Amino acid sequence: KEMLFNPKYGALGIFWMPYLLLIGFGGAILEIAVLLCFPFVFYYSSIPMEALLFGLFLFVIFELITIMQYILVLYLDRNFHLSLIIAACCMKPYQLFLTWIRLIALYREFRKEKVTW
């Protein structure tokens, strides 16, 4: 925390630490905010089931686009093996796991807990 926006650390404190904070934790916080807002949209919608189904439809579409991007990269790299395709399908659950780990780390950092390996 002491390095954030601190000119004493040069570009690392002025630019890179805030950037890493925004990218590393901002995405996780945004995902949590969307997940927390979704029940309110569902509850206050005049057509809740349609809103829920549309949200799930968009989620599936976006996940399929992400998986297809990974598979396209494998194809372009001529590395089109079944195990890598399965790994591409496992990327989102792994990203969710890493998001959870980042949020726990951020929580512990702000509470100044002593953490060890």
Image: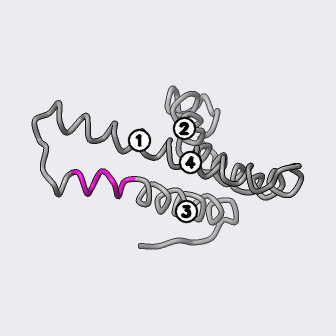
Q: Nearer the viewer, residue 8 or 45?
A: 45
Magenta extent: 85-91
Q: Which mark is residue 17?
A: 2
Q: Report, in whole angstroms, how far the alpha carbon at label 1 lies from the one at label 3.
A: 20 Å
Residue type at the position of mark 4 = Phe
Q: Which mark is residue 59?
A: 4
Q: Residues within 10 Å of mark 3 (few under 14, many from 20)?
A: some
Query: SS for tag 2?
Result: helix
Q: Nearer the viewer, mark 2 or mark 3?
A: 3
Mark closer to the chain start, 4 or 1: 4
Q: Is residue 26 above or below residue 76?
A: below
Residue 89 colored magenta?
Answer: yes
Q: Report, in whole angstroms, how far the alpha carbon at label 4 lies from the one at label 1.
A: 11 Å
Q: Report, in whole angstroms, how far the alpha carbon at label 2 lies from the one at label 3.
A: 20 Å
Mark closer to the chain start, 2 or 3: 2
Q: Nearer the viewer, mark 4 or mark 1?
A: 4
**Mark 1 lies on residue:** 66
Q: Report, in whole angstroms, how far the alpha carbon at label 4 lies from the one at label 2.
A: 31 Å
Residue type at the position of mark 3 = Trp
Mark closer to the chain start, 4 or 3: 4
Q: Nearer the viewer, mark 4 or mark 2?
A: 4
Q: Residues within 10 Å of mark 1 (few under 14, many from 20)?
A: some
**Residue 80 at what x, y percent from top left?**
13, 44
Residues tagged 2 and 3 counted as in contact (Cβ below 8 A) = no
Residue type at the position of mark 1 = Thr
Q: Main secondary structure of the magenta part?
A: helix
Q: Residue at x 20, y 52 (%)?
A: 84
**Mark 3 lies on residue:** 100
Query: SS for tag 4?
Result: helix
